[in-house]
């Protein structure tokens, strides 16, 4: 499921996802990890982090507040080019999350679609937005299909991902079912990757992941970035963040 630049948009429209190989060199991945881990050790990182009962960090929200350089650290020509190809030139970064599956502290997620977005105010009356929640102090809401269909997630792999460390599994074409999950006859695909590879995925693709092998020493660290094609949202809603690309990248 590797996509060349020429076929990226076509594959994403058909399958709902595509893997771009070698987007970030090893040195770039090291720099991202170093800066991100330092930021997560700070007071803002402590507030945004999600930890196990033993104190091990396995996820973090609000990465744009914790590590402001996340707004630009992803901006490398292969990725900005792919995003422009799929979303158009006016896309923006709207949310950044971090995930890890540490050795001996792994976790799993059942099949789901990513339906919620971060907004400035989730209390506005609307026929389109629903199920307001607050996550780590930020208002969230379930977005309508027409918004989700014009979004794309980029998952930057900061570690090699094998069957050993709980890879993401996706169901090709499941984004065409809109908000409904696929039936039991669907055939999932495990997304295996090398560090520096990027998975591009529509939010409406069915995805899940299992736990890492019990004896693994591998982490599975992911920088998860969500992008939207349009700055404006319906019904007077506004993105919590909308960071445009650095032109000339």
Image: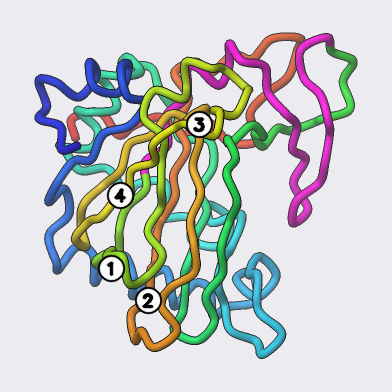
Residue 56 percent location from the top left of the image: 58, 84
Find the distance from the CA under tag 2 to the CA under tag 3: 24 Å
Q: Which residue is mark 2?
A: 219
Secondary element under disc 1, as helix, strand or loop, is: loop
What whole-number distance in Å separates the C-alpha atoms at marks 3 and 4? 15 Å
Left or right: residue 186 versus residue 10 is right
Does residue 61 sit above or below 231 in this rendering?
Answer: below
Density class for disc 1 (Cα within 10 Å; few <14, some 14-19, many ≥20) is many
Query: Quadrant location of the C terminus?
Result: top left
**Residue in the image at 22% along x and 28% along y:** 82
Sequence-wise first label, 4 or 2: 4
Q: Earlier in the sequence, mark 3 or mark 4?
A: 4
* Circle 2 Cα neighbour tier, 10 Å, few/some/many (<14 / 14–19 / ≥20): many
Q: Of the two numbered discs 1 and 3 on the same chain, state the one appearing first in sequence.
A: 1
Q: Which mark is residue 203?
A: 3
Q: In this figure, which residue is indicated by the disc labeled 4?
A: 191
State how far apart marks 4 and 2 are (Cα).
15 Å
């Amino acid at each position: 499921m590797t996509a060349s630049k020429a076929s990226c948009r076509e594959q994403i429209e058909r399958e709902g996802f595509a893997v771009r190989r070698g987007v970030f060199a090893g040195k770039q991945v090291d720099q991202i990890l170093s800066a991100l881990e330092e930021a997560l050790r700070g007071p803002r990182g402590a507030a945004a982090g999600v930890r196990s009962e033993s104190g091990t960090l396995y996820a973090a929200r609000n990465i744009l507040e914790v590590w402001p350089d996340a707004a630009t650290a992803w901006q490398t020509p292969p990725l900005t080019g792919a995003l422009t190809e799929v979303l158009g030139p006016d896309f923006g970064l709207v949310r950044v999350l971090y995930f890890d599956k540490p050795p001996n502290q792994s976790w799993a997620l059942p099949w789901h679609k990513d339906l919620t977005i971060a907004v400035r105010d989730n209390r506005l009356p609307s026929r389109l937005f629903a199920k307001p929640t607050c996550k780590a102090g930020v208002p969230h809401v379930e977005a309508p299909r027409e918004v989700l269909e014009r979004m794309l997630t980029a998952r930057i792999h900061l570690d090699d991902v094998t069957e050993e460390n709980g890879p993401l599994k996706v169901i090709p074409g499941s984004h065409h079912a809109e908000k409904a999950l696929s039936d039991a006859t669907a055939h999932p695909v495990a997304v295996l990757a090398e560090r520096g590879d990027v998975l591009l995925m529509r939010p409406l693709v069915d995805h899940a992941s299992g736990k890492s092998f019990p004896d693994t020493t591998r982490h599975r660290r992911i920088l998860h970035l969500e992008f939207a094609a349009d700055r404006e949202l319906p019904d007077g809603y506004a993105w919590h963040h909308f960071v445009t690309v650095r032109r000339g990248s």
